Each structure stands twice: as structure tokens, then as C-alpha cells.
Image (tube, helix red, strand yellow):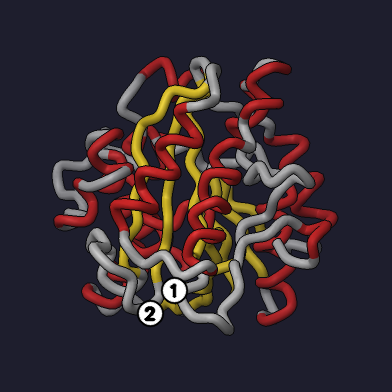
Amino acid sequence: MGFVPTMGALHRGHSRLLQEAAAECAFVALSIFVNPLQFDSPADLKAYPRELESDLTVARSAKCHLVFTPTEATMYPGGPPEVTVDPGRLGGRLEGRSRAGHFRGVLTLVAKLLHLAGPCRVYFGEKDAQQLALVRRMVSDLELPASVVACPTVREPDGLALSSRNGRLSADERKAAPILFEALSDAAVLVRKGERRGDVLRAEMARRIGGESLARLDYVAVVEEASWEDVVEITGPTRALAAAWLGETRLIDNLVLPWTASATVHNTNEERGGV
């Protein structure tokens, strides 16, 4: 079975996950559940889009066999659980520092869903790279019967990573939103030219995002792909990450950096031949 866990408001990125699952698995299941445990703001939870009918249309077009749409009472019949999944040290960094308790909520739900699903291949997008890394660690550390499959980020033609939150952007904010991808791409260009110092790459990304008047920087980071430790000097596979506010909407993005001359950037937009 191929399993795609989501919070709904499905877009082309989710469709790509379903397509990958269908290409590799005889049976495809999708879950849609807006998980209250991973929100640190009641207002953000309330504002999260809920578009079940259009989501079901997407699922049908992707030939999904099963859509699981539980209520909060179904997933947490006794209220918020007292026993949860500790995301470890990585869960308190970057997104975890900006969104307290977020990854504990994510991993607790994913663990419950994987318990219900049983042996499966579970599909996640690389846009939420830190979440993907933590799910992989949880599946490995807890020996859950699942294989975690990563799918490349799907982007708009101007580089903006697809996200359900993009719909909250004003027209001007939407025009400015690709600044995250542009900053990450600048870092990739520097690496291609031979730059290996993490502080230089972080400074360049911060400078580029800071130059956009509508953007408010949250963080930039350059981490080792395997350990997720901050990079002093690039010596192996490395990922650059950025988060910023556009008005009241917080966006995140990341890019694998081309650390060898033969490497290529993984997350380009569809019109350039990738996703």
C-alpha cells in the first residue's frame, strides 16, 4: 500500500505524491486531517483551509483507492493525548524553535496513522524537509513497518514552492514570495562557484531576503543532509533552508546544494524539467 498523509487543501504537490504512490503501489490511501496538535496558534488552526469536496475531486482524479477523513474525536477520543512522540533535539531547532511543539504534534499523528495503515510506503514532499527528516528518524528508531519515500518539491514557474498557505498571500505578497527560492538559488550559485563556507552562504541568503520590503526573515540555515547539524564548511551533501513572513503568512523553502562539480540542484521548477 502507498499512503499519503495530508491536512487537505490539496494542490499539485499532493497530486504528485499520489501519482508516485500509484506508480509504485497496487493500492493507494490518502488521509485528510487538520491536526490540532501541530498548531501553536488557535487562530492559525481555525484559518487553515478545509476544502473536502475539492480534495475528494483531486483524490478521484489521481485514482486514489481510499480516503480517510477522521474527525478530531476519532483521532483523539480522549482529548489531547498525554503520551506523545518526542522529536528529539532536531525537533527543537529551526521550525521547531519557531513553532513550539509543532513536531511533537506532527510525529504523534504520523505514528498513529502509520499504526492504522500497517505495512506501507508513506510519501512526503521535500518542501517540509525537516519534517521529512524527523519522520524518517521516528520510523527507524521506533522500527515502524513503513518505508518513507521523499518526493521533490513542486514549484510554480517563478520558483515558489506549492503550499496551501500560498492562497493567503495578497497580490503584492504573492509577487514577492519567490524571494525565498531566489535566496536559496543564490546560495547554490555560490557553491557552484566554489564557496564552501556556511557563514557566507547564510549571510547571502539573509541579505537577499532582507532586501525584499514585504518579507520579514525568520531564519536561514545551511545543514548537513545526514546529521542536520549546522555547516561550518561544506564537505558533503548539504541543504539550505529559509523561512520568512510575507504579511501574516509564513512560508518555508529549502534546496539541496550542489556541493560537487557534477551535482545539480534537485528542486527546480517544473518548466525547467524538474519539480
Mark 2 nearby-residue class (10 Å; few <14, some 14–19, many ≥20): some
SS for dot 2: loop
- Vertical arrangement, residue 71 with respect to residue 16, above or below: above
- Residue at the spot 36% in from the left edge and 43% down from the top edge: 203
The quadrant of the picture occupied by the N terminus is bottom right
Where in the figure is residue 33, as x and y percent of width and height? 51, 42
- Residue at the spot 74% in from the left edge and 78% down from the top edge: 23
Name the residue tied to disc 2: 145
SS for dot 1: loop
Q: Is residue 240 visible?
A: yes
- Residue at the spot 55% in from the left edge and 18% down from the top edge: 214
Using the image as rendered, state which of residue 218 and residue 84 is in the foreground. Answer: 218
Contact between labelled residues 2 and 1, with CB atoms less than 8 Å apart: yes
Q: Amino acid at mark 2?
A: Pro
Question: In this figure, what is the number of numbered marks?
Answer: 2
Where in the figure is residue 274, as x and y percent of width and height? 73, 66
Where in the figure is residue 92, as x and y percent of width and height? 19, 46
Using the image as rendered, state which of residue 212 and residue 110 is in the foreground. Answer: 212
Using the image as rendered, state which of residue 24 and residue 194 is in the foreground. Answer: 194
Rendering quarter of residue 189: bottom right
| C-alpha distance separating marks 1 and 2 | 7 Å
Where in the figure is residue 101, as x and y percent of width and height? 23, 38
Name the residue tied to disc 1: 118
Q: Amino acid at mark 1?
A: Gly
The quadrant of the picture occupied by the C terminus is bottom right
- Residue at the spot 52% in from the left edge and 50% down from the top edge: 184
